[in-house]
Image (tube, rainbow, N blue to C red):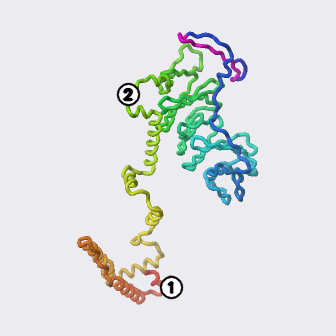
Amino acid sequence: QVGSAAKDLKVFRFAIDAQSRVSYMDARGDEDNQLPRGTDFEWTVATRENHVLGEHPHVSVYDEVFVETVGGDLTFKVENNTKSGKGIYAEPVENLNQQLADAEIAYARTGGLIVIRVKPLGESVVRFFAYAPEVRKVYRIDEIGLSCVALPEDQGIVFPGGYCLKNGQKRAFDGDVTQMELERVVRSPNGEDTLYVYFRWADGQYVLMPYNAIKKEMAVPIRTNGMSLFPDGRLVVFRAATEATRVHPIQVWRTPFQSEEFAASAPTDGSYLAKVGNRDLVRGISDAISICPRDAERHRDVSRHAVHAAHGPRQPGAAARDAQHRTRPDRHARRPGPRGVRRHQSRLRRAPGHRQRLRALHEEPRGSRHAGRRGAEDHGARAPRDPHRRARGRAHLAERRDHESRHRRPDRADAHPRGPRALVR
Protein backbone atom coordinates (compact mmCIF):
# COMPACT_ATOMS: atom_id res chain seq x y z
CA GLN A 1 0.00 0.00 0.00
CA VAL A 2 1.56 3.23 -1.15
CA GLY A 3 -1.31 5.67 -0.52
CA SER A 4 -4.03 6.52 1.96
CA ALA A 5 -6.62 4.38 0.19
CA ALA A 6 -6.63 0.63 0.69
CA LYS A 7 -6.46 0.02 -3.05
CA ASP A 8 -3.42 2.26 -3.64
CA LEU A 9 -1.05 -0.64 -4.14
CA LYS A 10 2.18 -1.48 -5.89
CA VAL A 11 2.39 -5.13 -6.92
CA PHE A 12 5.77 -6.82 -7.32
CA ARG A 13 6.21 -9.89 -9.49
CA PHE A 14 8.59 -12.77 -8.90
CA ALA A 15 9.45 -15.78 -11.05
CA ILE A 16 9.90 -19.38 -9.86
CA ASP A 17 11.98 -21.70 -12.03
CA ALA A 18 11.93 -25.51 -12.26
CA GLN A 19 14.35 -25.80 -9.32
CA SER A 20 11.99 -23.69 -7.15
CA ARG A 21 14.38 -20.75 -7.17
CA VAL A 22 12.74 -17.33 -6.82
CA SER A 23 13.92 -14.29 -8.77
CA TYR A 24 12.61 -10.73 -8.91
CA MET A 25 10.92 -9.61 -12.15
CA ASP A 26 9.39 -6.12 -11.88
CA ALA A 27 6.80 -3.95 -10.07
CA ARG A 28 4.18 -3.97 -12.81
CA GLY A 29 1.79 -6.52 -11.39
CA ASP A 30 -1.18 -4.18 -11.08
CA GLU A 31 -2.99 -5.82 -13.98
CA ASP A 32 -2.45 -9.28 -12.47
CA ASN A 33 -3.94 -8.19 -9.14
CA GLN A 34 -7.41 -7.38 -10.47
CA LEU A 35 -10.38 -8.99 -8.73
CA PRO A 36 -13.07 -10.68 -10.83
CA ARG A 37 -16.43 -9.07 -11.45
CA GLY A 38 -18.79 -9.13 -8.51
CA THR A 39 -21.68 -10.30 -10.71
CA ASP A 40 -21.94 -12.79 -13.54
CA PHE A 41 -24.86 -11.03 -15.23
CA GLU A 42 -25.82 -7.68 -16.72
CA TRP A 43 -28.54 -5.51 -15.22
CA THR A 44 -31.48 -4.61 -17.47
CA VAL A 45 -32.96 -1.20 -16.67
CA ALA A 46 -36.76 -1.05 -16.79
CA THR A 47 -38.22 1.44 -19.26
CA ARG A 48 -41.70 2.64 -20.10
CA GLU A 49 -42.17 -0.45 -22.24
CA ASN A 50 -42.29 -2.43 -18.99
CA HIS A 51 -45.02 -0.25 -17.49
CA VAL A 52 -48.53 -1.68 -17.17
CA LEU A 53 -50.98 1.16 -16.55
CA GLY A 54 -54.23 0.92 -14.64
CA GLU A 55 -55.77 1.70 -11.28
CA HIS A 56 -52.71 0.16 -9.59
CA PRO A 57 -49.92 0.36 -12.21
CA HIS A 58 -46.75 -1.70 -11.97
CA VAL A 59 -43.56 -2.61 -13.81
CA SER A 60 -43.50 -6.00 -15.52
CA VAL A 61 -40.35 -8.09 -15.02
CA TYR A 62 -40.21 -10.95 -17.53
CA ASP A 63 -44.03 -11.12 -17.21
CA GLU A 64 -43.44 -13.23 -14.08
CA VAL A 65 -43.23 -10.71 -11.25
CA PHE A 66 -44.56 -7.15 -11.12
CA VAL A 67 -43.07 -4.30 -9.05
CA GLU A 68 -44.44 -0.89 -8.10
CA THR A 69 -43.67 1.87 -5.59
CA VAL A 70 -47.02 3.67 -5.83
CA GLY A 71 -49.28 4.23 -2.84
CA GLY A 72 -46.64 4.50 -0.13
CA ASP A 73 -45.11 1.05 -0.34
CA LEU A 74 -42.90 -1.12 -2.51
CA THR A 75 -45.01 -4.07 -3.62
CA PHE A 76 -44.27 -7.28 -5.51
CA LYS A 77 -47.11 -9.06 -7.30
CA VAL A 78 -47.22 -12.31 -9.24
CA GLU A 79 -50.41 -11.53 -11.17
CA ASN A 80 -50.69 -8.95 -13.92
CA ASN A 81 -53.71 -7.38 -12.27
CA THR A 82 -53.88 -3.59 -12.05
CA LYS A 83 -57.28 -3.61 -10.31
CA SER A 84 -55.74 -4.70 -7.01
CA GLY A 85 -52.71 -3.32 -5.21
CA LYS A 86 -52.14 -6.39 -3.04
CA GLY A 87 -49.11 -8.57 -3.58
CA ILE A 88 -46.95 -11.28 -2.04
CA TYR A 89 -44.44 -8.86 -0.52
CA ALA A 90 -44.53 -5.21 0.50
CA GLU A 91 -42.47 -2.72 2.50
CA PRO A 92 -42.90 1.03 3.03
CA VAL A 93 -41.13 3.80 1.10
CA GLU A 94 -40.25 7.29 2.29
CA ASN A 95 -41.97 9.31 -0.45
CA LEU A 96 -45.69 8.56 -0.46
CA ASN A 97 -46.54 10.63 -3.55
CA GLN A 98 -44.18 9.19 -6.14
CA GLN A 99 -45.34 7.94 -9.51
CA LEU A 100 -44.58 4.68 -11.26
CA ALA A 101 -41.78 6.14 -13.41
CA ASP A 102 -40.05 7.86 -10.47
CA ALA A 103 -38.42 4.69 -9.10
CA GLU A 104 -35.27 3.29 -10.70
CA ILE A 105 -35.80 -0.44 -11.30
CA ALA A 106 -33.38 -2.92 -12.86
CA TYR A 107 -33.54 -6.69 -13.06
CA ALA A 108 -31.66 -9.79 -14.24
CA ARG A 109 -32.06 -13.56 -14.29
CA THR A 110 -29.35 -15.74 -12.74
CA GLY A 111 -29.13 -19.03 -10.88
CA GLY A 112 -32.78 -19.89 -11.50
CA LEU A 113 -33.83 -16.70 -9.68
CA ILE A 114 -34.79 -13.17 -10.69
CA VAL A 115 -32.77 -10.47 -8.94
CA ILE A 116 -34.28 -6.99 -8.82
CA ARG A 117 -32.69 -3.65 -7.94
CA VAL A 118 -35.02 -0.86 -6.78
CA LYS A 119 -34.18 2.74 -5.82
CA PRO A 120 -37.32 4.62 -4.77
CA LEU A 121 -37.66 8.34 -5.36
CA GLY A 122 -35.65 10.52 -2.97
CA GLU A 123 -33.87 7.62 -1.21
CA SER A 124 -30.13 7.07 -1.09
CA VAL A 125 -30.26 3.38 -0.20
CA VAL A 126 -30.66 0.96 -3.09
CA ARG A 127 -32.73 -2.13 -2.28
CA PHE A 128 -31.99 -5.55 -3.73
CA PHE A 129 -34.41 -8.46 -3.92
CA ALA A 130 -34.43 -12.06 -5.12
CA TYR A 131 -37.59 -13.68 -6.49
CA ALA A 132 -37.94 -17.48 -6.63
CA PRO A 133 -40.40 -18.38 -9.43
CA GLU A 134 -40.76 -22.00 -8.26
CA VAL A 135 -42.24 -21.06 -4.89
CA ARG A 136 -43.32 -17.47 -5.68
CA LYS A 137 -41.44 -15.89 -2.79
CA VAL A 138 -39.52 -12.63 -2.55
CA TYR A 139 -36.52 -12.02 -0.29
CA ARG A 140 -34.75 -8.76 0.38
CA ILE A 141 -30.98 -9.32 0.12
CA ASP A 142 -29.01 -6.08 0.10
CA GLU A 143 -25.73 -8.05 -0.08
CA ILE A 144 -26.53 -8.67 -3.75
CA GLY A 145 -25.24 -5.15 -4.34
CA LEU A 146 -21.78 -6.23 -3.11
CA SER A 147 -21.52 -9.44 -5.11
CA CYS A 148 -23.88 -11.98 -6.63
CA VAL A 149 -22.95 -15.03 -8.69
CA ALA A 150 -24.85 -18.16 -9.65
CA LEU A 151 -24.35 -21.45 -7.85
CA PRO A 152 -23.38 -24.58 -9.82
CA GLU A 153 -26.09 -26.00 -12.09
CA ASP A 154 -28.16 -22.84 -11.52
CA GLN A 155 -29.20 -24.06 -8.08
CA GLY A 156 -29.42 -20.50 -6.79
CA ILE A 157 -27.22 -17.53 -6.01
CA VAL A 158 -24.46 -16.83 -3.50
CA PHE A 159 -23.65 -13.46 -1.95
CA PRO A 160 -21.31 -12.32 0.85
CA GLY A 161 -22.48 -14.04 4.00
CA GLY A 162 -25.15 -16.37 2.61
CA TYR A 163 -26.96 -17.99 -0.28
CA CYS A 164 -30.46 -18.39 -1.70
CA LEU A 165 -31.65 -21.44 -3.64
CA LYS A 166 -34.26 -21.44 -6.37
CA ASN A 167 -36.49 -23.71 -4.25
CA GLY A 168 -36.94 -20.85 -1.79
CA GLN A 169 -34.38 -21.95 0.81
CA LYS A 170 -32.35 -18.98 2.06
CA ARG A 171 -29.65 -18.75 4.70
CA ALA A 172 -27.59 -15.81 5.95
CA PHE A 173 -24.70 -16.35 8.36
CA ASP A 174 -23.76 -14.05 11.22
CA GLY A 175 -20.87 -11.66 10.82
CA ASP A 176 -19.98 -8.35 9.23
CA VAL A 177 -19.78 -8.56 5.42
CA THR A 178 -19.79 -4.86 4.55
CA GLN A 179 -17.46 -3.90 1.69
CA MET A 180 -16.75 -7.56 0.93
CA GLU A 181 -15.73 -8.28 -2.66
CA LEU A 182 -15.46 -11.56 -4.51
CA GLU A 183 -11.78 -12.43 -4.87
CA ARG A 184 -11.99 -15.83 -6.58
CA VAL A 185 -14.05 -18.96 -7.08
CA VAL A 186 -12.31 -22.34 -6.62
CA ARG A 187 -14.03 -25.45 -7.96
CA SER A 188 -13.07 -28.97 -6.98
CA PRO A 189 -12.15 -31.39 -9.80
CA ASN A 190 -15.04 -33.71 -8.91
CA GLY A 191 -17.57 -30.92 -9.44
CA GLU A 192 -19.16 -31.46 -6.04
CA ASP A 193 -17.71 -28.58 -4.00
CA THR A 194 -17.13 -24.91 -4.75
CA LEU A 195 -15.21 -22.42 -2.61
CA TYR A 196 -16.18 -18.74 -2.76
CA VAL A 197 -13.49 -16.43 -1.40
CA TYR A 198 -14.45 -12.88 -0.38
CA PHE A 199 -11.97 -10.19 0.61
CA ARG A 200 -12.25 -6.79 2.30
CA TRP A 201 -9.60 -4.23 1.47
CA ALA A 202 -10.11 -2.11 4.59
CA ASP A 203 -8.84 -4.67 7.14
CA GLY A 204 -7.58 -7.49 4.91
CA GLN A 205 -10.15 -10.02 6.14
CA TYR A 206 -11.14 -13.09 4.13
CA VAL A 207 -14.41 -15.00 4.25
CA LEU A 208 -14.26 -18.55 2.83
CA MET A 209 -17.65 -20.03 1.94
CA PRO A 210 -17.63 -23.69 0.76
CA TYR A 211 -20.75 -24.94 -1.03
CA ASN A 212 -21.72 -28.58 -1.69
CA ALA A 213 -23.75 -29.18 -4.86
CA ILE A 214 -25.11 -32.58 -3.75
CA LYS A 215 -26.40 -31.50 -0.35
CA LYS A 216 -27.32 -28.07 -1.73
CA GLU A 217 -26.07 -26.37 1.38
CA MET A 218 -23.17 -24.22 2.49
CA ALA A 219 -20.91 -24.91 5.45
CA VAL A 220 -20.23 -22.30 8.11
CA PRO A 221 -17.92 -19.67 6.58
CA ILE A 222 -14.30 -19.46 7.70
CA ARG A 223 -13.12 -15.97 8.64
CA THR A 224 -9.39 -15.42 8.42
CA ASN A 225 -6.75 -12.77 7.77
CA GLY A 226 -4.68 -14.87 5.39
CA MET A 227 -4.87 -18.11 3.42
CA SER A 228 -2.84 -20.41 1.18
CA LEU A 229 -4.28 -23.17 -0.99
CA PHE A 230 -1.87 -25.88 -2.17
CA PRO A 231 -2.23 -28.15 -5.24
CA ASP A 232 -3.00 -31.20 -3.09
CA GLY A 233 -6.01 -29.47 -1.53
CA ARG A 234 -4.43 -28.44 1.77
CA LEU A 235 -5.72 -25.08 2.98
CA VAL A 236 -3.65 -23.08 5.47
CA VAL A 237 -5.36 -20.18 7.26
CA PHE A 238 -4.25 -17.86 10.06
CA ARG A 239 -5.80 -15.03 12.01
CA ALA A 240 -4.26 -11.78 13.16
CA ALA A 241 -4.26 -11.05 16.88
CA THR A 242 -5.51 -7.80 18.35
CA GLU A 243 -2.18 -7.29 20.13
CA ALA A 244 1.41 -7.86 19.12
CA THR A 245 2.55 -11.45 19.72
CA ARG A 246 5.35 -13.77 18.71
CA VAL A 247 3.15 -16.84 18.23
CA HIS A 248 0.52 -16.92 15.50
CA PRO A 249 -1.79 -19.98 15.37
CA ILE A 250 -2.19 -21.61 11.97
CA GLN A 251 -4.90 -24.04 10.92
CA VAL A 252 -4.42 -26.65 8.20
CA TRP A 253 -7.53 -28.01 6.48
CA ARG A 254 -7.80 -30.96 4.13
CA THR A 255 -10.15 -29.90 1.36
CA PRO A 256 -11.29 -31.34 -2.01
CA PHE A 257 -10.08 -28.22 -3.83
CA GLN A 258 -7.17 -29.83 -5.60
CA SER A 259 -5.62 -28.66 -8.82
CA GLU A 260 -6.65 -30.30 -12.09
CA GLU A 261 -3.13 -31.71 -12.57
CA PHE A 262 -3.04 -33.26 -9.10
CA ALA A 263 -6.49 -34.84 -9.52
CA ALA A 264 -5.61 -36.22 -12.97
CA SER A 265 -2.54 -37.98 -11.57
CA ALA A 266 -4.64 -39.96 -9.08
CA PRO A 267 -5.12 -43.64 -10.07
CA THR A 268 -8.57 -44.91 -11.14
CA ASP A 269 -10.08 -48.41 -11.00
CA GLY A 270 -11.39 -48.29 -14.58
CA SER A 271 -14.99 -48.98 -13.54
CA TYR A 272 -18.08 -47.82 -15.37
CA LEU A 273 -18.64 -44.98 -12.88
CA ALA A 274 -15.10 -43.79 -13.45
CA LYS A 275 -15.77 -43.64 -17.18
CA VAL A 276 -18.98 -41.69 -16.68
CA GLY A 277 -17.10 -39.01 -14.78
CA ASN A 278 -17.51 -37.53 -11.36
CA ARG A 279 -19.13 -34.31 -12.56
CA ASP A 280 -22.01 -36.12 -14.29
CA LEU A 281 -22.46 -38.39 -11.26
CA VAL A 282 -22.61 -35.38 -8.96
CA ARG A 283 -25.27 -33.80 -11.16
CA GLY A 284 -27.43 -36.95 -11.13
CA ILE A 285 -27.05 -37.58 -7.41
CA SER A 286 -27.90 -33.96 -6.65
CA ASP A 287 -31.14 -34.19 -8.65
CA ALA A 288 -32.06 -37.48 -6.96
CA ILE A 289 -31.44 -36.19 -3.45
CA SER A 290 -33.46 -33.05 -4.14
CA ILE A 291 -36.58 -35.23 -4.40
CA CYS A 292 -36.29 -36.39 -0.76
CA PRO A 293 -37.05 -33.05 0.96
CA ARG A 294 -40.09 -32.52 -1.27
CA ASP A 295 -41.50 -35.93 -0.38
CA ALA A 296 -40.84 -35.31 3.31
CA GLU A 297 -42.76 -32.04 3.17
CA ARG A 298 -45.73 -33.60 1.39
CA HIS A 299 -45.74 -36.74 3.59
CA ARG A 300 -45.26 -39.11 0.70
CA ASP A 301 -43.56 -42.50 0.63
CA VAL A 302 -42.25 -44.94 -1.93
CA SER A 303 -45.54 -46.81 -2.23
CA ARG A 304 -47.32 -43.71 -3.52
CA HIS A 305 -44.73 -43.30 -6.24
CA ALA A 306 -45.20 -46.96 -7.19
CA VAL A 307 -48.99 -46.60 -7.39
CA HIS A 308 -48.65 -43.43 -9.46
CA ALA A 309 -46.26 -45.15 -11.86
CA ALA A 310 -48.54 -48.20 -12.19
CA HIS A 311 -51.84 -46.39 -12.76
CA GLY A 312 -50.55 -43.30 -14.54
CA PRO A 313 -51.59 -39.70 -13.88
CA ARG A 314 -54.93 -38.91 -12.32
CA GLN A 315 -57.86 -38.08 -14.53
CA PRO A 316 -58.83 -34.42 -14.99
CA GLY A 317 -61.19 -33.23 -12.30
CA ALA A 318 -60.18 -35.91 -9.78
CA ALA A 319 -58.79 -33.36 -7.35
CA ALA A 320 -62.02 -31.34 -7.48
CA ARG A 321 -64.12 -34.44 -6.86
CA ASP A 322 -61.95 -35.42 -3.90
CA ALA A 323 -62.27 -31.94 -2.42
CA GLN A 324 -66.06 -32.05 -2.88
CA HIS A 325 -66.19 -35.45 -1.19
CA ARG A 326 -64.14 -34.20 1.76
CA THR A 327 -66.32 -31.13 2.21
CA ARG A 328 -69.64 -32.99 1.80
CA PRO A 329 -71.54 -32.94 5.13
CA ASP A 330 -72.40 -36.18 6.87
CA ARG A 331 -76.11 -36.95 6.61
CA HIS A 332 -76.02 -38.59 10.04
CA ALA A 333 -74.36 -35.60 11.72
CA ARG A 334 -76.40 -33.47 14.08
CA ARG A 335 -77.41 -30.35 12.24
CA PRO A 336 -77.53 -27.11 14.18
CA GLY A 337 -80.83 -25.31 14.24
CA PRO A 338 -83.18 -23.17 16.30
CA ARG A 339 -84.35 -24.41 19.63
CA GLY A 340 -87.86 -24.93 18.30
CA VAL A 341 -86.59 -27.21 15.52
CA ARG A 342 -84.73 -29.47 17.94
CA ARG A 343 -87.76 -29.74 20.25
CA HIS A 344 -90.08 -30.56 17.36
CA GLN A 345 -87.77 -33.32 16.12
CA SER A 346 -87.50 -34.76 19.62
CA ARG A 347 -91.31 -35.01 19.83
CA LEU A 348 -91.35 -36.95 16.56
CA ARG A 349 -88.78 -39.39 17.91
CA ARG A 350 -90.95 -40.01 20.99
CA ALA A 351 -94.04 -40.80 18.87
CA PRO A 352 -95.45 -44.35 19.29
CA GLY A 353 -93.92 -46.84 16.85
CA HIS A 354 -91.42 -44.35 15.44
CA ARG A 355 -88.33 -46.51 15.94
CA GLN A 356 -90.04 -49.62 14.54
CA ARG A 357 -91.10 -47.79 11.39
CA LEU A 358 -87.61 -46.35 10.88
CA ARG A 359 -86.03 -49.76 11.33
CA ALA A 360 -88.45 -51.29 8.85
CA LEU A 361 -87.73 -48.51 6.37
CA HIS A 362 -83.92 -48.44 6.56
CA GLU A 363 -82.72 -51.85 7.67
CA GLU A 364 -84.91 -54.10 5.53
CA PRO A 365 -83.95 -52.63 2.12
CA ARG A 366 -80.33 -52.36 3.20
CA GLY A 367 -80.24 -55.98 4.32
CA SER A 368 -81.95 -57.21 1.18
CA ARG A 369 -79.64 -55.10 -0.96
CA HIS A 370 -76.50 -56.50 0.70
CA ALA A 371 -77.89 -60.00 0.49
CA GLY A 372 -78.58 -59.51 -3.19
CA ARG A 373 -75.00 -58.37 -3.76
CA ARG A 374 -73.61 -61.40 -1.98
CA GLY A 375 -75.82 -63.60 -4.06
CA ALA A 376 -74.72 -61.83 -7.20
CA GLU A 377 -71.09 -62.50 -6.35
CA ASP A 378 -71.86 -66.19 -5.84
CA HIS A 379 -73.92 -66.69 -9.01
CA GLY A 380 -72.13 -64.19 -11.23
CA ALA A 381 -75.23 -61.96 -11.71
CA ARG A 382 -76.65 -58.97 -9.88
CA ALA A 383 -79.90 -59.42 -7.95
CA PRO A 384 -82.80 -57.16 -9.00
CA ARG A 385 -83.72 -54.22 -6.78
CA ASP A 386 -86.90 -54.25 -4.68
CA PRO A 387 -89.62 -52.56 -6.80
CA HIS A 388 -91.73 -51.72 -3.71
CA ARG A 389 -88.94 -49.91 -1.83
CA ARG A 390 -89.89 -46.42 -3.01
CA ALA A 391 -93.59 -47.05 -2.48
CA ARG A 392 -92.99 -48.03 1.15
CA GLY A 393 -90.90 -44.90 1.62
CA ARG A 394 -93.63 -42.64 0.26
CA ALA A 395 -96.21 -44.32 2.48
CA HIS A 396 -94.03 -43.85 5.54
CA LEU A 397 -93.47 -40.18 4.71
CA ALA A 398 -97.22 -39.61 4.37
CA GLU A 399 -97.75 -41.29 7.74
CA ARG A 400 -95.20 -39.01 9.40
CA ARG A 401 -96.83 -35.91 7.92
CA ASP A 402 -100.25 -37.01 9.14
CA HIS A 403 -98.86 -37.66 12.62
CA GLU A 404 -97.21 -34.26 12.93
CA SER A 405 -100.31 -32.44 11.67
CA ARG A 406 -102.33 -34.01 14.49
CA HIS A 407 -99.73 -33.28 17.22
CA ARG A 408 -98.64 -29.82 16.06
CA ARG A 409 -98.46 -27.06 18.63
CA PRO A 410 -99.78 -23.71 17.34
CA ASP A 411 -97.16 -21.59 19.16
CA ARG A 412 -94.26 -23.61 17.69
CA ALA A 413 -95.77 -23.64 14.22
CA ASP A 414 -96.23 -19.87 14.28
CA ALA A 415 -92.54 -19.41 15.10
CA HIS A 416 -91.63 -21.01 11.75
CA PRO A 417 -93.58 -19.56 8.80
CA ARG A 418 -92.81 -22.52 6.56
CA GLY A 419 -94.43 -24.89 9.07
CA PRO A 420 -93.20 -28.10 10.70
CA ARG A 421 -93.65 -29.99 7.46
CA ALA A 422 -90.63 -28.18 5.97
CA LEU A 423 -88.68 -28.87 9.14
CA VAL A 424 -89.18 -32.61 8.80
CA ARG A 425 -87.77 -32.45 5.30
According to the picture, the residue beneath numbered tag 1 turns out to be: 414
Viewer-side residue, 324 vs 381: 381
Left or right: residue 215 compared with residue 26: left
Say whether disc 2 or disc 1 marks the residue closer to the N-terminus: 2
Q: Nearer the viewer, residue 347 or 173?
A: 173
Residue range highlighted in magenta: 7-20
* Quadrant of the image occupied by residue 186: top right
Q: What secondary structure is the stretch in magenta mostly built from? A: loop
Tell me the SS state at disc 2.
loop
At a point 57% along the width and 39% down the height, the residue shown is 157
Residue 300 position within the rendered picture, expressed as x and y whole percent measured from the top left: 41, 51
Q: CA distance from mark 2 to mark 1?
A: 94 Å
Q: Is residue 127 magenta?
A: no
Q: Residue at x 47, y 38 (%)?
A: 283
Q: Which mark is residue 375?
A: none
Placement of 152 over or under 394, stated as above or below: above
Label 2 packing within 10 angstroms: few (<14), some (14-19), many (20+): few
Residue tagged 2: 269
Q: Residue at x 39, y 72 (%)?
A: 332
